Image: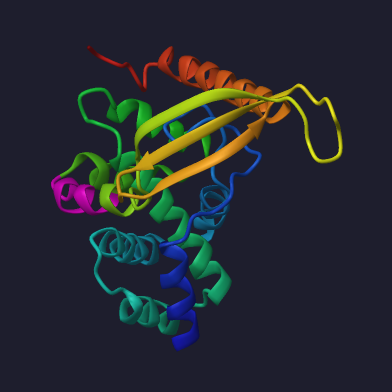
Amino acid sequence: MAAAAGKAAVAAYGHGESGGGRGGGFLGPRVPAEVEAMARGVQDVGKETFRRLLKVTVNALEGKDCKESVNLIAESTNLSEEQLAFLISGMYTLLREALRLPLSTFKQEVFKEDLKELRIPEDFIMDFSSIVFGNRRPASEGTALVQGSRLPSIQDFKWRVDVAISTSSLARALQPSILMMMKLSDGTAHRFEVPVAKFQELRYSVALILKEMNDLEKRSILKIQD
């Protein structure tokens, strides 16, 4: 059963790929695949086992070692390694995303409604809600946010347009390209060249992201305040 403990514990810290299910709630436009798998699997889990799994997940959010606890659950239940991994990973992602949102704009009623759409049992929704909006939120909130912010941020960004008059293969090219330079918060700098076609793809992707953000802001879950 030690393998089950290790596999489930590692899964709790993983980042799953987006699924194709319903979205638009606090989980974003596409519900993560591990959350969908958890929502399906948790319907066959008893209340006592669920609360033990939830306690393990909260410990993982707080940065604690949860392998021994997962091992005990694996030994005392008939859940397989894959089931434990899916359940804990899905719970971890769900709580992590919920804890990133400020209580001033994230309402408990909306959170519960989103979980109902995932068909999570009512009793389990109440337990999730007690973590996100209850007394244990401060202990797990800071860790969840820190663990979700590992990559360096952009501190400075510069660009310019260059036109290649000629190349080694063509006497007269006249092909424009965009030269970009990024300085990151870890002190590193990156210079790279972007062809016009790729830059157009970037423009389209940014426009799509802005549209999705605008759609989210129109919902009652997220309201950006000045």
- Residue 176 versus residue 148 in the image, above or below: above
Q: Where is residue 156 in the image (x, y as percent from the top left)?
A: 35, 33
* Left or right relative to 55: residue 123: right
Residue at 61%, 36% in the rendered image: 193
Residue at 46%, 36% in the rendered image: 181
Q: Quadrant of the C terminus?
A: top left
- Relative to the observer, which residue lies in front, 49 or 214? 214
Q: Which residue lies furthest to the front in this view?
A: 171
Residue at 39%, 82% in the rendered image: 71
Q: Position of residue 56 (x, y in %)?
A: 31, 66
* Left or right relative to 47: residue 116: right
In which quarter of the view is residue 115 placed? top left
Q: Where is residue 13 in the image (x, y as percent from the top left)?
A: 41, 62
Residues rendered magenta in the picture: 135-144
In which quarter of the view is residue 108 placed? top left
Magenta stretch: includes residue 141: yes
Q: Residue furthest bottom?
A: 2
- Residue 51 versus residue 66 in the image, above or below: above
Residue 191 in sight in this render: yes
- Relative to the observer, which residue lies in front, 55 or 182? 182
Q: Position of residue 83 (x, y in %)?
A: 55, 68
Q: How is colour applied across the structure in the image? A: rainbow
* Left or right relative to 60: residue 158: right
- Relative to the observer, which residue lies in front, 215 or 22? 215
* Left or right relative to 140: residue 152: right
